[in-house]
Image: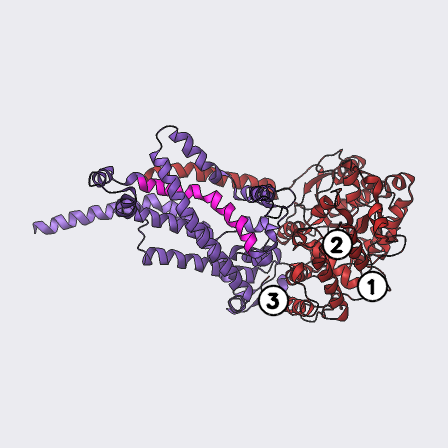
Chain colours: A red, B purple
Amino acid sequence: MRPRRTRALKPLLGGCLLALAVSGLTGCGGDAGGTDTLTWFINPDGGGASPTGGGQAQLAAECSEASGGAYTIQVEQLPNEATDQREQLVRRLAANDSGVDIMSLDPVVVPEFAEAGYLVDVPEQYIEDFTDDRVQGSLDASQWNDTFVAAPFWANTQLLWYRKSVAAEAGLDMTKPVTFEQIIEAAQATDTDFAVQARRYEGYTVLINALVAGAGGSIVQNEGASAEDTQLGLDTPEGKRAAEIIQELAGSGAVGPALSSMNETNALNMFQDEETSGFMLNWLYVYAAMKENDLSFLDDIAWTTYPRVDADKPAAPPFGGIELGVNTASRNKDKAWQAISCITSAEHQKEYMLGTGNAASRSSVFDDPQIQEQFPMADVFRESLNQAVQRPRTSYYGDLSTAVQRTWSPPEQVDPNRTPAESTELIMKVLRGEALL
Amino acid sequence: MSTRTVENHLSDRARDERRLGWRLAGPAFVIMILVTFYPILQAVYTSLFKYRLTDPDQREFVFLRNYGIILTDPLWWRAFGTTTLITVVTVVVELVLGFAIALAMEKVIYGRGLLRTIVLIPYSIITVVSAFSWFYAFATDTGFVDPLLNKLSFGLFPADFDWFGGFWSAMVPICISEIWKTTPFMSLLLLAGLTQIDSAMEEAAVVDGATWGERLRKVILPNMKSQIMVALLFRTLDAFRIFDNIFIMTAGSHDTSSLSLVAYNQTISRTEVGLGSAVSVLLFCCVVIIAMIFVKGFRVDLAGGRK
């Protein structure tokens, strides 16, 4: 047995080493000379990797074309979930991978990447271009310590999607701001579902942050502080109020059978179920998705701004979307900024919005008749983008978010008297590097 | 005088054999050291630092503090408990199932090759793929498990039971997917043991009037003890490092984190490579201890039939 195994293994091993060497070369080598190839790491959108799919890949192809041969943009797709996108980028950036030029960044990673020195500051000559006509949420998300470190690309926020018939049956006046409690009651009364995201993932932090901010508080009270000096705003009346809402949601019986497994896709699926659909908190993309699915009750669907936590306080819709950053290790920074300027032009933002359903960060795009026609919610959406509240801006966001998710999961066990305090304790321990996650 | 020459001659030969042995195994040994010892030593070294990948300037030597943090953290012990539970449950079930399949594979005469191929299919499937398949099978929206159980129990079982919504219920799909995937490996190892048993002994037992149960207990099991222990050892070490199924199905919610997942979260998600390395080193120690218990405690002879 033995000698035979060794003999069989040797060519195998040689093959593996060869494969490793080859993949290493193509993985890290990049283009040495000739035309400049820019690699743009994109988050998956409706267009996929197709140069005619209407997504980032199409913008890449068009801008490559428009550059007149100055650069060619090649796209690489990141994983689906924001957390996984961050993980992959961190791995590359920490290794000074020059094969990454432009990155599609979730707003929450901007502080972390900027603090770690992974992002190049926006050059002076582009600042006017990148700040002109942008919604407030995008401007906030592109800065760190009052310096622009990324260019606003597209902007997202959640709306409250609902069925007119259900709201009417429950007697809910949707022309006025509604509260979470009103929606829960309406869903209970009509035996429908209120689809929210409460799986142990980033989307749950989005919900919790919106609840804390909607109650008038904020999870991190001194943004930009060092790990040890961070002051948390969870164990406060506002944090407790947020926990109360989660408790009410979990105990309502109106959030579907598997609240602790719900992500955006599950929520959309639940909302597309004709028998139980009532209300849903979700991002803009769901509208295009429902249209594409030829939903039989599409005419019955309406939208309004994010629900309030307390009737007398403004709602705090979550902010999402994508900012474009340039990698410090990139060998083509100048051309990368040129490319970003092309990608984020008003024309391209409009095209991208029409192609993928991801909204522009430029306010004026929402006034476009074509946009108004395809996105009947454009005005509500822009209003929401200007009201939107950022998730905690700290370079320890990943840890903070995971610690929040851990202490607030499963939602069925959230207790306003206990959870915010436990959460604060764990987050502080984690920030000091004294606890596992 | 003459005996001395013989001794010298023998030791010369032994020396040559040893030299040949080193020459044959040497290259493999060097590669082994490069690919296994270097990362292990690097992990041990890194584990002595408070070191965050995104904040390299703050790197600080903390000696064994990371280990102290981990071993006093309830999360580590919960993950340890979960991992142990999964290991024990899956290995025991796999042993019983695997043995039954091995017996069938040995006894079947027609379509033996086909049967062995079919049995091997789950093992040839990538763990992540199998984890996803079982995840979708048990999911409330796309799954067939809930509707099936609901039908079979005449509506007693809820049609939209959230398997991943609690620790014990999540353990079911996690363990099932693990068992489904690795039972073939167990049964192959056991089949190797079964085929090594001298059939004359079994025939003698039949002639003596032993029942099937008696033959199993008195002839088959004692004669393949070492193969059973080797199979158990391999599977225990493997099961203790479970990662994919949990990562896909629950991502560690409801305390379903395994030790590997804890290591992943510190190193990859948090980029706390110091703390993460310490977790990995501790996991490595656990695996070494398990192997030692098997080898020393149960006297498993890894060299198998070479006695």
Q: Is residue A248 left or right of residue A422?
A: right
Label 3 neighbourhood size at 10 Å, few (<14), some (14-19), many (20+)?
Answer: many
Name which of mark 2 and mark 1 comes first in the sequence: 2
Residue A1 in magenta? no
Q: Is residue A59 left or right of residue B263?
A: right
Label 2 neighbourhood size at 10 Å, few (<14), some (14-19), many (20+)?
Answer: many
Point 50% across, 60% down: residue: B80
B189 or A309: nearer the eye?
Answer: A309
Which chain is indicated by disc 2? A
- Decide if residue A389 is in sight here: no
Q: Dot 3 corresponds to which residue?
A: A433
Image quarter for residue A137?
Answer: bottom right
Helix, strand or loop status at disc 2: loop
A196 or A183: nearer the eye?
Answer: A183
Name which of mark 1 and mark 3 comes first in the sequence: 1
Separation of residues labelled 2 and 1 (CA atoms)? 27 Å
Image quarter for residue B188?
Answer: top left
Q: Position of residue B307 (x, y in %)?
A: 25, 47
Which chain is indicated by disc 3? A
Q: Dot 1 corresponds to which residue?
A: A310
Task: Give above or below for B17 relative to B285.
Answer: above
Q: Nearer the viewer, mark 2 or mark 1?
A: 1
Point 33% across, 49% down: residue: B302
Helix, strand or loop status at disc 1: loop
Q: Residue furthest top?
A: B110
